């Protein structure tokens, strides 16, 4: 198996990408990494790493897509950028998958324009893993978290099918519980698109357990949360903002006087543990589902550990033939409709 | 001034409503409370309270709208329910405003059907105060947080006008900074409706400062956040869920071993303070803006303090002639368009 690593996209530079990927790769003996990016920089980093037993290649590129570049223009004009070259490798089957921590816009555009949509899907969806805080550590998959701003009910039903497959194949959920993000749990709630989607999912073979409110999304009561890219993005980012704000508030509380500083010292380990739990880095990368290849997107400031986890996730996606399984199920749905 | 108190809507029973309202009323010498609900129950509660100097009336009602009642059916059939009677008093100008902690659905329906929309508005919006955690205690107003599921750009522009007025009159912001909830800060982001709204607000006289992402909504960078009722509801409820989840995680961390229990003891006061800060109860009630009267909605489990704060807010809204100011500004907009 070959996986391309876009070495130039991370806010932290190529080192995180390379080290994270190498650590992950040491777990697999059938994996070859292709480091895509500035060859000199990559070689310089590799020089200082003790590499045992891994095979890797370097593919030199001369351009980099920056976060402030306009995605469509950048993807079209920077043809020798690490992100575009990695995507082209996926498209040409030179590699089985790619990983990037670069600009989300350029990632989505590369997925749509270079790797391309599956035949039976109008708009791919970006998935995200959301943490759970109540029942064990049962994370849920949320999609779409920002690829498609104007989703139709047909789009949302496709997301349900893809989410079902992802949760089954990659999250080991036997019969994934699917929920529709809504403003209330009762049938008949929500906007026009969500109401239509509810009716279609109710009649489907999927394990649709109904509407879910944003306040219970983190409770471990569901495996897959279906929503349009606008409200999904709002949910993800509200959580991120709330977590940051609350940790800052906690820090203030801990540092406000001498007594609390002593208390904070006693709690240090437990609070570190809690902070780690809140760290999005441990929850793997986002995946654009509905395209003709595997491309995983990590956070721009993802740590080595995050890259390592995302690479493991990518490996499993290739092994599970996730793209073929999704293509087959979407085709089934289309044939039923016609 | 007269304010009707729906005594029967709170999850905690009439006592919270009555006590909270009486405490607030002691601050004003021109305020008469009208307790709407079961007269016997209300009298029983009042019997045990030392009331100095307040004037109040009791308006007996025989029905109660429950949380599981279908809003439209309940509002139409339970004509002698405390919520419907209070709304009718607002509509007939028997009182200047009402407060309820009852079912949100019935509240919205009463607002729309009994009090009625202003002439120049298609869909009223429900506002909510959201806390801020960075710059001082500069809360922001978010609307719509759930009244209108399918908002047009014209609706959102109306929300901007109403939000501007509310922030100016009731939150003492001289030139309220208005933001559009979006998936990114750049112009051109978002769904069709949001993109259209951006263009209209950009050309308007309002102090529109552009898009805002959900992760920075709590940073004190804005005074008014404009969004459709679906995504606004998702934002509010994600924050609620995140805050609960994080406080639970913190509790677990504090109670996990002996050392941390000692630490927790030292931190007790500061953590209590933090918990109080996160309490939605202190942030007043939601207001359905765009109707022909003032009706304030508190959380079903709002405390006495929350009712007290909400009553102060209601008093200020009446004093500020908020409905007349909104009606005038919306009329101006309509005349400009024609």
Image: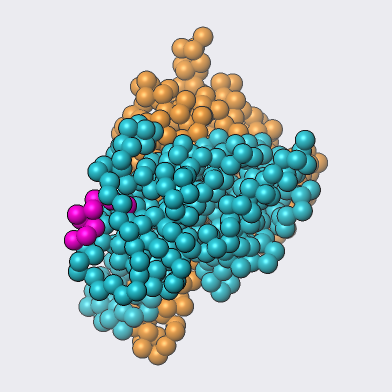
Chain colours: A cyan, B orange
Question: Could you tell me residue B73's position as x and y percent?
Answer: 78, 41
Taking the magenta stretch, the answer to whether it contains residue B39 is: no
Q: Nearer the viewer, residue A281 or A124?
A: A124
Report the residue at 31% width, 42% height from top. Answer: A81
The image shows a total of numbered marks equal to: 0
Residue A274 at least partly seen: no
Question: Could you tell me residue A70's position as x and y percent?
Answer: 34, 34
- Vertically, is B120 above or below A171? above
Q: Nearer the viewer, residue B83 or A161?
A: A161
Q: Quadrant of residue B78?
A: top right
Give the magenta range. A36-44
Q: Nearer the viewer, residue A220 or A318?
A: A318
Q: Quadrant of residue A104?
A: top left
Q: Quadrant of residue B2?
A: top right
- Vertically, is B44 above or below B219? below
Report the residue at 44% width, 83% height from top. Answer: B255
> Is A73 positioned to the left or the right of A39 in the image?
right
> Is B254 positioned to the left or the right of B84 in the image?
left
Report the residue at 42% width, 88% height from top. Answer: B257
Question: Could you tell me residue A273's position as x and y percent?
Answer: 38, 76
> Is B80 positioned to the left or the right of A308 in the image?
right
Residue A289 at least partly seen: yes
Taking the magenta stretch, the answer to whether it contains residue A40 is: yes
Question: Could you tell me residue A277's position as x and y percent?
Answer: 42, 70
Mostly what secondary structure, the magenta segment?
helix
- Vertically, is B38 above or below A262? above
Q: Nearer the viewer, residue A201 or B200?
A: A201
Report the residue at 55% width, 40% height from top. Answer: A117
């Amino acid at each position: 198996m070959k996986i391309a690593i876009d070495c130039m996209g991370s806010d932290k530079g190529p080192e995180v990408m390379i080290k994270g990927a190498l650590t992950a790769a040491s777990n697999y003996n059938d994996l070859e990494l292709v480091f895509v990016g500035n060859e000199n920089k990559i070689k310089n980093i590799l020089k200082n790493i003790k590499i045992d037993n891994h095979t890797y290649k370097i593919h030199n590129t001369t351009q980099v897509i920056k976060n402030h570049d306009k995605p469509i223009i950048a993807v079209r004009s920077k043809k020798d950028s690490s992100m575009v070259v990695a995507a082209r490798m996926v498209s040409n089957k030179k590699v089985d998958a790619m990983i990037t921590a670069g600009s989300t816009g350029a990632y989505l555009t590369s997925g749509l324009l270079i790797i391309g949509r599956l035949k039976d899907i109008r708009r791919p969806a970006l998935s995200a893993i959301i943490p759970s805080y109540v029942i064990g550590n049962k994370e849920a998959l949320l999609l779409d978290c920002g690829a498609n701003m104007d989703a139709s009910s047909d789009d949302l039903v496709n997301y349900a099918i893809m989410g079902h497959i992802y949760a089954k194949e990659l999250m080991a959920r036997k019969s994934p519980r699917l929920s529709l993000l809504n403003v209330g749990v009762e049938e008949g709630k929500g906007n026009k698109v969500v109401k239509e989607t509810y009716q279609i999912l109710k009649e489907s073979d999927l394990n649709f357990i109904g509407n879910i409110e944003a306040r219970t999304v983190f409770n471990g009561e569901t495996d897959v949360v279906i929503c349009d890219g606008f409200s999904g993005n709002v949910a993800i980012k509200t959580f991120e903002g709330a977590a940051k704000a609350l940790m800052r508030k906690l820090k203030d509380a801990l540092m406000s006087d001498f007594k609390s500083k002593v208390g904070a010292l006693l709690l240090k380990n437990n609070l570190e543990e809690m902070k780690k739990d809140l760290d999005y880095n441990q929850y793997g990368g986002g995946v654009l589902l509905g395209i003709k290849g595997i491309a995983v997107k990590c956070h721009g400031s993802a740590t080595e550990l995050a890259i390592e986890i995302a690479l493991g996730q990518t490996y499993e996606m290739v092994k599970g033939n996730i793209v073929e399984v999704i293509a087959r199920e979407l085709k089934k749905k289309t044939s039923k409709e016609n």
